[in-house]
Amino acid sequence: MKKTALVTGGAGGIGSAACRLLAKEGWRVVINYHTSRDKALALAEETGGLAVQADITQPEQVQAMFDAAGPVDLLVNNAGIACYGLITDLTYADWRRLFSVNADGAFLCCKAALPHMIREKSGCIINVSSMWGQVGASCEAAYSASKSALIGLTKALAKELAPSGIRVNCIAPGVILTPMLKDFTDEELEAIRQETPLGLLGQPEDVAELIVYLASERAGFMTGQILGINGGLVIT
C-alpha cells in the first residue's frame, strides 16, 4: 500500500515539483491548494494524486483537508507568502498575514497530521523555510521572522517527537525560480546570480530532490536539521 504525502502549497513552484517527484518515487500525493484550482487539478491528474482546497490559516479547513486525505505519513509544510518593504511601512495586518500562512499554517497542519503518526510511531515532517529565516533580509522583516519561526518549530518538534519515531527536518532554500519572484526584474535576478558563489539560481526541482531524500529511509538518522540549498549564498 502506498504511503501518503500531503504537500501544502502543492500547486506552486516548489510544491508542484515536489509532488511530481514524490509520485515518481511511489508516494500517493495530496495536493493542497488555496486558489490555484486548475493547476492543482491538472497536477492531481498528472500524478494520480488528490487535490484538496483549504486555507491553511483556518483550523476547520485544515482538519477537513486531513479528513479528506486520510492518514498522512509525510507532511511537507511548503505553503508560504512574502512581503517586501521597509519596516516603517509594514502594517500589523501585513505582519499577521505572513505569520498566519508561514508559521500558523504549519502549526495547524502538524497538529492535524500528528495523531496518526504518533499512533503508528512513524512519520516525517519537512518544513520549507528560507535562507532569510536563517540570517534575515533587509526589507523582509515579516518574511524573515515568520520563516525563522518555522526553523524554531522544526527544532522543538524534532526533540518532542523523536521518541515517537517521527522525524522533523527543515529546508532553507535560497533564490529559487518560482512565481514568488515575479516582482524581481531581470537585472535584479542577474545581480543575485552573480552574487551567488555557484553562479546559479535555484530550480524548484533542486528543492524537490532534497524533500524526497529527507522523506526516504536514506535520511532515517536525520532529525532536527536545517538544510540550506542556496548555491553558497548563505553558509552557516
Image (cartoon, rainbow, N blue to C red):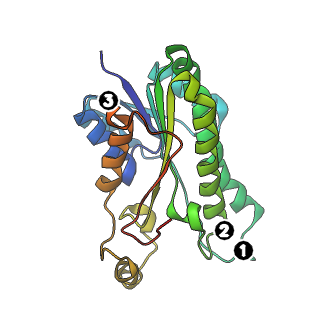
* Mark 2 crowdedness (10 Å alpha carbons): few <14, some 14-19, many ≥20: many
Label pair 1/2, CB-CB below 8 angstroms? yes
Quadrant in the picture for the N terminus: top left
> Which disc, if any, is residue 87?
1
> Does 141 appear above or below 65?
below
In screen coordinates, is 226 left or right of 190?
right
Label 1, secondary structure: give it: loop
The numbered mark at residue 141 is 2
Q: Residue at x 66, y 63 (%)?
A: 142
Residue 44 as seen in the image, left or right of residue 173: left
Three-letter residue code for mark 1: Ile
Closer to the eye: label 2 or 3: 2
In this rendering, the answer to whether 77 lies above or below 181 is above
**Label 3 Cα crowd, 10 Å radius (few <14 / some 14-19 / many 20+):** many
Quarter location, residue 2: top left
Taking the view exactly as shown, the residue that stands out farthest to the front is 221
Q: CA distance from mark 3 to mark 1?
A: 41 Å
Circle 1 Cα neighbour tier, 10 Å, few/some/many (<14 / 14–19 / ≥20): few
Residue 234 shows in this picture: yes
Which one is nearer the viewer's eye here, 76 or 94? Answer: 76
Q: Which residue is mark 3?
A: 49
